[in-house]
Amino acid sequence: MSKDDEYDYLFKVVLIGDSGVGKSNLVSRFTRNEFNLESKSTIGVEFTTRSIQVDSKTIKAQIWDTAGQERYRAITSAYYRGAVGALLVYDIAKHQTYENVSRWLKELRDHADTNIVIMLVGNKSDLRHLRAVPTDEAKQFAAENGLSFIETSALDSSNVELSFQRILTEIYRIVSNKALENSGDVIRPTGGETINVSPNSGDANAAGKCC
C-alpha cells in the first residue's frame, strides 16, 4: 500500500457555482499550489485528492470540480452522490454569480444528501477595487441558510487552505462524534468508501458556525 493510500477517512467534497468563478483554480491551489491565469472551462467532471491531518487522523479529500455551464447539468446526480461537503463558489466582483447562489443551493438540496456540509465561498477577494458583493450581505445569506462562509483568492492564496481545512474538519467532527455515539469505535472506511454524514449534522453548521 503506497503512502497516498493510507488514510483514516475519505471525504468527497464537490465544488459548484457559475462558470468562471475560479473553482478549478481553488482546487489546483489547494491540491498542487498552482494557479493558471489562462485557466480554461472544465469540461465535464474532474477530481483530485489531497490528504490533511485533523486530530492526528489522516483525512483524504476527494475534491470534485465540474463546469458551471448549463449543458453539463445532466451529470448532477452522479456528481453529488456520496458527497459529504460542498463549496458553493461565487465571484465577489460579479454580482450575477452571487445572485445565482440561491439556484445552486436549491440544486444541492435537491440532489445531494440532506446532511451535506456546505460552505459559501466568495472567491477573487484580491479584486477589492472591483467588489460587487458586500461581505456582510453574503455573510448574512450564509447565516440564514445554515452555511459557513469565507472569502478566498486562488490568485494570491489567501484563505484557500483555510477553507478546505475548515470544511474537512467540520465533516470529520460530525462523523467522529456520530461514530462515538454509535459504538465508541472510530469508523475506518475501506479504500474508496465514502462516509455518509449523520442525520444530526444539521445542527453543526447552523447559523453559519464553522468549526
Image: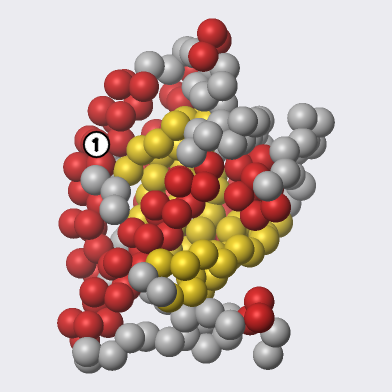
The percent coordinates of residue 42 (x first, y second) are 74, 44
**Is 197 on the left or on the right of 47, as rendered?**
left
The percent coordinates of residue 139 (x first, y second) are 30, 29
Front residue of 89/177: it is 177
Tell me what residue is drawn at x 44 percent, y 32 percent.
151
Tell me what residue is drawn at x 56 percent, y 21 percent.
126
Q: How many marks?
A: 1
**Is 150 on the left or on the right of 72, as rendered?**
left
The percent coordinates of residue 143 (x first, y second) are 24, 36
Tell me what residue is drawn at x 24 percent, y 74 percent.
177
Query: Is residue 40 visible in the rendered structure shown here?
Result: yes
Query: Is residue 67 visible in the rendered structure shown here?
Result: no
Q: Is residue 26 above or below residue 135?
A: below
Q: Is residue 17 above or below residue 78?
A: above
Give the SS element for disc 1. Answer: helix
Name the residue beneath numbered marker 1: 143
The percent coordinates of residue 162 (x first, y second) are 45, 46
Q: Is residue 111 above or below residue 28?
A: below
**Is 184 on the left or on the right of 11, as rendered?**
left
Q: Quadrant of residue 84?
A: bottom left
The type of residue carrying mark 1 is: Ala
Q: Quadrant of the N terminus?
A: bottom right
- Neighbour tally class for label 1: few under 14, some 14-19, many 20 plus, Cα within 10 Å: some
Front residue of 154/39: it is 154
